[in-house]
């Protein structure tokens, strides 16, 4: 085989990371199990229940409904699908900030619903007044983001929840990346803070579960009932998931990752990542870069193209936001030593360019 897995010693832009050792071991044990047919594979089904219960604990949902999805895209599509199924009209719309993940564009296209993207404010959060103005009698779902993928921002979740409630619409929170940081902050973002109907939270991101291991949570079983279809040839008679056959490795890995790390290791990871983000932001400011003050451990900053390309040429994996800022995500594998090395690369590029 002439290919090798990605080394993570210079990966700065990814929202995935190295799996926890216990998660990796669990995943290997359940490679052949299919959670899509829980009656045939009861052991992995029980692990999925444990994972969902753990995610419910993290998000203040005492009796959670949900499952381990393939990732945030599937979970967001399911949230839109559920809202469409509950909608009282034939032409439902979804209102979301323009900072919402591109999976909502996929969901709207697949499900035939109108997606209304509204502006964000000067700090890259959902503009509450703009959301309120976009909502009407056909709105089936309002979306808030708790940890945006470009700037790491947390939308005003309680305010958005009130807008959804007043419009008799469902409310979805996308915390796919932020959900494993937010329990250790003072942000309002989960089921206990607002009338949230569904929530995305991905163990295979900051949670250090193996891919694929997303999380789709619902406040009650009625949501899953509305999504369920009959499965006549399986031992299990109904299936509420979007995919059929699913990864037993992802489910078992998620359960093991959560069991091994919640809450202490996750708290330590958040504190380390937040410290790294603050360090990097300060160092970049000292060098004259324009930096978006990090709210969660994600640093976005202005980076001229020659320096961006110089960093890429040295093997650093980094990306840009839609508006052009370079972005660095302080994932569990990102160390202070890595950040020193990255800064040294920028310094060398600036010297070479005569800056």
Image (spheres, rainbow, N blue to C red):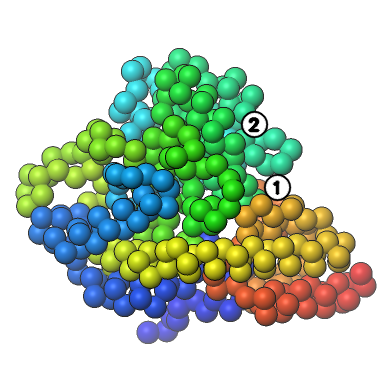
How much space separates mark 2 and mark 1, taking CA atoms? 18 Å
Horizontal side of 173 relative to 234 (left or right) equals right
Can you identify the residue that label 1 sits on? 323
> Which residue is painted at 64% across and 62% down in the image?
274
From the viewer's perspective, is residue 231 above or below residue 185?
A: above
> Which residue is painted at 86% across and 65% down in the image?
286
Q: Quadrant of the N terminus?
A: bottom left
Where in the figure is residue 232, as x and y percent of width and height?
Answer: 7, 44
Horizontal side of 49 relative to 172 (left or right) equals left
From the viewer's perspective, is residue 247 above or below residue 228?
A: below
Where in the figure is residue 153, as x and y percent of width and height?
Answer: 62, 47
Element under label 1? loop
> Which residue is painted at 46% across and 23% down in the image?
165
From the viewer's perspective, is residue 141 above or below residue 355?
A: above
Dot in front, 2 or 1: 2
Can you identify the residue that label 2 sits on? 127
Horizontal side of 353 relative to 44 (left or right) equals right
Where in the figure is residue 269, as x and y percent of width and height?
Answer: 54, 67
Residue situated furthest bottom in the rendering: 1
Q: Earlier in the sequence, mark 2 or mark 1?
A: 2
Q: Residues within 10 Å of mark 1 (few under 14, many from 20)?
A: few
Q: Which one is in front, 53 or 337?
A: 53
């Amino acid at each position: 085989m002439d290919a090798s897995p990605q080394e993570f010693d210079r990966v700065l832009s990814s929202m995935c990371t190295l799996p926890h050792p216990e998660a990796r071991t669990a995943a290997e044990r359940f490679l052949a199990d299919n959670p899509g047919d829980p009656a045939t594979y009861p052991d992995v089904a029980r692990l999925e229940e444990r994972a969902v219960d753990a995610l419910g604990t993290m998000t203040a949902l005492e009796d959670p409904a949900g499952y381990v999805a393939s990732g945030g895209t599937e979970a967001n599509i399911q949230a839109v699908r559920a809202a469409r199924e509950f909608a009282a009209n034939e032409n439902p719309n979804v209102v979301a900030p323009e900072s919402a993940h591109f999976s909502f564009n996929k969901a709207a296209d697949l499900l035939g619903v109108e997606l209304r993207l509204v502006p964000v404010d000067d700090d890259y959060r959902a503009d509450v007044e703009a959301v309120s103005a976009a909502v009407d009698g056909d709105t089936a779902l309002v979306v808030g983001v708790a940890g945006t993928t470009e700037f790491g921002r947390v939308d005003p979740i309680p305010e958005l929840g009130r807008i959804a409630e007043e419009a008799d619409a469902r409310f979805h929170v996308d915390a796919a990346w932020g959900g494993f940081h937010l329990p250790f902050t003072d942000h309002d973002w989960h089921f206990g803070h607002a009338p949230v109907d569904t929530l995305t939270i991905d163990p295979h991101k900051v949670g250090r579960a193996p891919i694929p291991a997303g999380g789709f949570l619902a406040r009650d079983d009625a949501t899953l009932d509305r999504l369920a279809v009959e499965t006549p040839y399986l031992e299990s008679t109904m299936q509420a998931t979007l995919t059929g056959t699913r990864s037993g490795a992802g489910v078992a890995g998620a359960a093991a990752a959560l069991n091994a790390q919640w809450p202490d290791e996750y708290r330590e990871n958040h504190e380390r990542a937040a410290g790294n983000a603050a360090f990097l932001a300060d160092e970049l400011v000292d060098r004259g870069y324009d930096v978006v003050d990090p709210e969660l451990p994600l640093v976005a900053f202005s980076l001229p193209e020659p320096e961006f390309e110089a960093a890429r040429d040295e093997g650093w994996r980094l990306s840009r936001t839609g508006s052009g800022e370079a972005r660095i995500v302080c994932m569990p594998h990102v160390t202070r030593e890595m950040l020193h090395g990255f800064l040294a690369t920028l310094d060398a590029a600036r010297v070479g360019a005569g800056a």
